[in-house]
Image: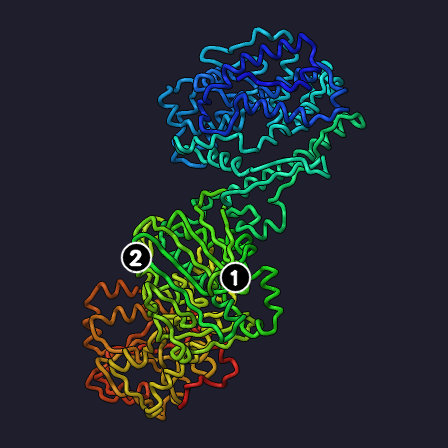
Amino acid sequence: MKIKIPIRLLSRLTEEHRLECEGVFLKYEEFAEKNMYFFDEYTDHSSKHVEFVLETTNKLIPEQTLELLNSTDIFVLILSVLHHDLGMHINFDSLKFLYKENPVNVFTGQHFQTLWNDFVKEENKKDEGLKIESLLDLEKLSFESYDVHKGVASKFIRIHHPFLANIIATNGFPGKSGFINYNEKRHSYLYELVGLVAHSHGTDLRQVMDYLKRKYGELWKTPFGCRAVYLMTLVRIADYLHITDDRIDRYRLLLSEFRSESSEKEFFKHQSVFHSQIIYDNPETIYVYSEPRNFEVYIEMDQLIDNIQNELDHSWAVLGEVYGSIEMKLTIRRITSNLKNTEWIEASKFVGQRLKFNFDIRLIGLLIEPLYGENPSYGIRELIQNSTDACKTRRAIEKNEYEAEVKITISREQFIIEDNGIGMDINVIKNYFLKIGASFAESREWNRLNEDKNFKESSILRNGKFGIGILSSFLIGDKIKVETRKLGSEHIFSFETNKYDQVISITKNRTKGEFIGTKIIIPLKCELDPSIIVNWYRLDDIRVLLNDEVLKNKIKNDEYGKWNILECGGGYDLEEIKWSYDYKIDPFRLKGKNESVTYMPNLICNGIVIPERYDKKVESYIISKWPTIVLKGPTSMIDLDLSRNELNSNLPFLSELEKQLLVSYIDKLKSVFKNGDDKQINICDSKVTSDFRVTNFKDQKLIFTKNGYGLFNSFFMQRNALKRVVRIWVKKGVNLRVLKECDSETAYILEGTGGHPYLKNKIVAFRDGYEICENAKIYMPILDYEDYQNWSANIYKLGKNFINNNVIHRFDLSQENYIREKFQLDIDTAEVVLAIEYNFNNSKKDSSFIFEEYFKNEAIMPFYNI
């Protein structure tokens, strides 16, 4: 095909320039009419496209401006149009030759090899599975090896083809062993300008202008008499305007399928353009009529119209700066389309916005996998959390007129979660659902809801944040399908995407039926165990179904009322804090990044279980096991880590909880002794090990005094003026009575039962635990003492200082009243195997500070003298 040059332009050429143009065009046609090696299915870049751009360029030049252009201007313009896409026609040999020659991009100063190597490394970062490191040594790569990565190279050429156009214009077409030059090139300086104008259509105009100033100095506006900047605006606008459907081969689809996503997008984008023309009463405006076949084409076309308008605005601004009031103008100032029409947008099923995930896709590997490993259970948790939050939001609006429900369906092929919550509109989808870490509770819409009086009466207890939920759903599968309708909206929005999609296709349709809420479908990438779902949500306020069966292990409303309420006066913005020792959460076994971890949860936040125990790092002198807690209120009040698996710090109300547990502990101690004589306590093995050692609390020592009983700690001893301690070990269970003659300053501790030779461990434990190493009196049966001394290990273990500094009293078991007279205790001497008497020393830290804080206004311990 012989390319037709518009007569209007040819008429401005000298004979010499005309003949040279025609000669170059004949050489070019040898390349342009052949199938492009890298883009054999791409949109048209052949002679047909060149002819269209030439004609469009011709139409962009007003008559008064054409009169100012000389033969050099037209010569450079025609040949730059010829060359501007010629880089798309290179082949494998051309690419290898250019890599070897290593030409420089004059606008950026980068060499070809640098551009290539940087591009290959960046592509490999995006997808390490490509394994394209071998492309770094392009010169040595065989055709067979290279053909495998043809798509990577074509992307490079598509990005840098304006640079290649410059190379071809100045050096010739790159072949296997050299440049194929044109014999007609008589004026090399003009071909330099041709290359610069052709190159400029892929570069910012101001960057090009900076180069012209460096290259040509004061002549930069008209180097060699050529108005280069004006020609650059013509080429870039004219190339942009070839968006009609004649750039595609409609029948190519019948012969083969698209092998690249870019080719497919270009094909359907151009196919969507039905017509374009100048507006009758506004001759400086082009109107483009388009009928996109899907959302992606719509977005591409909408963006293309915007890009052309931006290019027109930029070009007009540059022309004004460079040429001032001279008539260097374009015939077109504005482009518009039916896609910009409000009525068309409203009637269309497409959402008029370009949407995508609002985060770097590498966060999947950098954030989600380190947080959750590859465990799909966390993805399910996030989706359940978002669904239940949506239901709670709707309930706050509709009050009791609404029955909240979340349905989960699991098959071998897919995971489906559907809720009848508040649903989403395009604003929520864009700004919260697709935006990592965005909180809907911080939005303007949320604030508007809170201004509603009825809404305020029922707070919404949310856990989730849109963004994290959708991101973690990729632990379940690589693709998600979403369908949602917001309460009060007449449109259903639906979209399907995967984690690598750059643009998300969202469609809207008017509702058919009563569906309100959100439905998410995820094709499974691995088999899913349904049992991992039943543990996450525990409250009975929302009906949760798994494969049409209501989930068990819920805290029923009637049962929940039996829980203990924690009243906090610390100003915590929590609606409710309840605790119970009766409700236990089954162990969680979850696979983390490296191994499976078994959790023993005891915290539920707005219905969602937090796997790690809240008391993991809590120390208490009283509580050995903390109760299960259920919180209702803003999660901002507790410091959860990013994975929401555990707390970063202790619960803010932990001291209030500890106080209430302490009161509960004391009440249980009272119940142990409330039916007994306060002067006689029946102590036996069962009493010591079951009644006194109250479940879930540490084994605090119980003391007996002349006036009653209490706990052994510094607070109690000092408050009741107790100065002396007597610890007693007996052979078996006994009845202990403190006689009236007992010293009121003495506290007795019945340590328990045992006998020789194990007493050495009891003495050592006593010594090490209470730092009593001097002036203690030790009482032992004489036979046990003599036997004890024969054990050299005992002397060694107790230490010589202990033996030498403490008096050991030996008594005969036949002395029936020895213990009665010595300690004023109603107990047989024969029952005692060891007694230690010492003056109380409160230097060692114990549980007293807890009692001092919580009972500082009490004259005596609450259970001291029942």
Residue visible at 52% across and 22% down in the picture: 46
Q: Point out residue 406 in the picture as x, y percentages from the top left corner.
A: 41, 65
- Structure colour scheme: rainbow
Q: Say left or right for 70 vs 629.
A: right
Asked if 33 appears above or below 663 in the picture, the reply is above
Does the image show residue 807? yes
Marks 1/2 in contact by CB < 8 Å: the verdict is: no
Q: Point out residue 301 in the picture as x, y percentages from the top left corner.
A: 56, 40
Q: Nearer the viewer, mark 1 or mark 2?
A: 1
Q: Residue furthest right?
A: 325
Which residue, given by chain and number where applicable, does mark 1 sit on?
A: 486
Residue 553 lies in quadrant: bottom left
* Label 1: which secondary element: loop
Q: What type is the residue that disc 2 sits on? A: Asp
Point out which mark residue 529 bears.
Answer: 2
Q: Identify which residue, 244 or 209, lies in the foreground.
A: 244
Q: Point out residue 350 in the picture as x, y percentages from the top left corner.
A: 53, 49
Residue visible at 52% across and 61% down in the picture: 486
